[in-house]
Image (cartoon, rainbow, N blue to C red):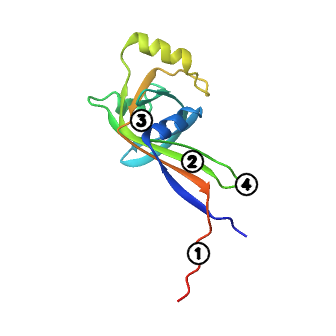
Amino acid sequence: MIEARQLQELTQAESLRLLSSVPFGRVVFTYHALPAIRPVNHLVVDNAIIIIASLGTAISAHAGSEGGTVVAYEADVIDPDTHLGWSVVVIGKAGRVVDESQIAGYRKALRPWVSGRMDDVIAIRADLVTGYQLVAGEAPQATIG
């Protein structure tokens, strides 16, 4: 028997708190006019997601353009047995961090999981945040008709 579950919308504050509780997510950006997704580790600082990327990658090139580029960022935790958990999506402009003291602090706090040179620190502004939580719920009532 499948247990009932309900989808509950989370507030922006709850969504960012949950996002900050996990070490990685997925950044979604445009590459050759098509959507591309890359797993990255992150920090949540105020209303921004901070990631580090290799210079010359597609996300890095677009984030360095004037005004940045619009991206999505997603992270989730879903239990494979209970199918309960949460998912958060952030949509906003990604741009390079240029303040040297901020860059140094972010580099110290955020260690990429892959080897190789990571030149760019990128901040994704949390302009639109949506979060949902899958929780145990009551089974729908049968209607008699």
The residue under the point 38% across, 45% down is 32
- Per the model, the C-alpha gap separating discs 2 and 4 is 14 Å
Q: SS at mark 3?
A: helix
- Give how far apart the Cα atoms at labels 3 and 4 are: 36 Å
Name the residue rendered at 40%, 30% in the picture.
47
Q: Amino acid at mark 4?
A: Asp
- In space, the residues marked 1 and 4 are separated at their CA atoms by 25 Å
The residues bearing labels 1 and 3 have C-alpha atoms spaced at a distance of 50 Å
| Type of amino acid at the residue the image marks with label 2 | Trp
Q: Nearer the viewer, mark 1 or mark 4?
A: 1
- Residue contact between numbered discs 1 and 3, judged by CB atoms under 8 Å: no
Q: Secondary structure at mark 1?
A: loop
Q: Is 90 on the left-hand or right-hand side of 139?
A: left
Q: Which residue is mark 1?
A: 141
List the residue tagged with mark 2: 86
Q: Nearer the viewer, mark 2 or mark 1?
A: 1
84 over 144 or under it: above or below: above
Viewer-nearest residue: 137 or 91:
137
